[in-house]
Amino acid sequence: MSHTDEPLGQFIHDGLSQGIPREQLTEALIVAGWNENQITGALSRYADTDFAIPVPHPKPYHAAREAFIYLVLFSNLLISTLALCTLLFSIINQLFPDAAALRQSTYLNQTTRWSISVLIVSFPVFLLVARRTRRALQKTPAIRGSAVRRWLTYLTLFITASSLLCDFSVLVYHLLGGGTTTRFVLKTLVVAALSGTILGYYLTDMKKVEVDT
């Protein structure tokens, strides 16, 4: 299906074919309820020339590069989250030690060092890639509707939501068995807080995408 089969794309195509200025098309669409991101994206499909009919821009195909960028983004997000979760677990274990565990101190020290090491490497990568993608979205709002971006974002949301559901399922299981401890409850809250933050942020972002597209 071509973009001219869509109501917005068809309207832009017909308007430009009749020589109607882009400004007037934009004003009419805004009055009709379309937002500026949608209009800009539709108009950007055509070159701003004086040719008798609309001249389409070639559609770049950067799916592979885009997939790579978002895979790096979300993989480092998940790795950083796991490392932070492990680090917080280690701190909780130190604050509420298990008297029955042997050589706990050595194990906790190693776990803490590994978690901090992973965070030092992965979290800056996540921030850099996130900054790059944010700038790209600000420069070209139309790419918010990218299929690659949507699929990988929803995949991350699925993993996060699954972790959250498993976390609360384990909590309910222990509550029913009467085996909860302060340490266990704190760990559950850590997982819930981290998963809930990621889930809330990206769900809000994807809701904006659905509205804009």
Image (cartoon, rainbow, N blue to C red):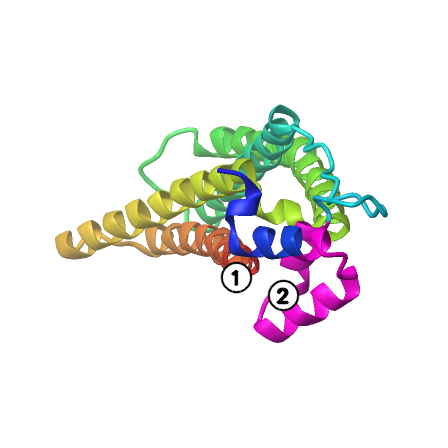
**Badge count:** 2
Foreground pick, 153 / 189: 153
Q: Secondary structure at mark 1?
A: helix
Residue 71 painted magenta: no
The relative height of residue 169 versus residue 27 in the rendered view (above or below) is above
Q: Which residues are magenta?
A: 15-43
Report the mark closest to the observer, 2 or 1: 2
Residue 18 painted magenta: yes
Q: Can you give x and y, in whole percent of width and height, for residue 37 in the image?
A: 67, 58
Left or right: where does residue 156 sit relative to residue 114? left
Q: Residue at x 71, y 71 (%)?
A: 27
Residue type at tag 1: Val
| Magenta stretch, main secondary structure class | helix
Q: Secondary structure at mark 2?
A: loop
Query: On the image, numbered disc 1 is attached to which residue?
Result: 211
Q: Give the distance between the C-alpha atoms of the residues marked 2 and 1, in whole angstroms.
A: 9 Å
Q: Residue at x 57, y 71 (%)?
A: 33
Mark 1 Cα within 10 Å, few/some/many (few <14, many 20+)?
few
Task: Identify the disc placed on residue 35.
Answer: 2
Left or right: where does residue 173 sit relative to residue 199? left
Left or right: where does residue 206 sit relative to residue 139? left
Residue type at tag 2: Asn
Mark 2 Cα within 10 Å, few/some/many (few <14, many 20+)?
some
The relative height of residue 93 versus residue 18 in the rendered view (above or below) is above
Mark 2–mark 1 CB contact (< 8 Å): yes
Q: Residue at x 74, y 52 (%)?
A: 138
What quarter of the picture does the C terminus occupy? bottom right
The relative height of residue 48 versus residue 207 in the rendered view (above or below) is above
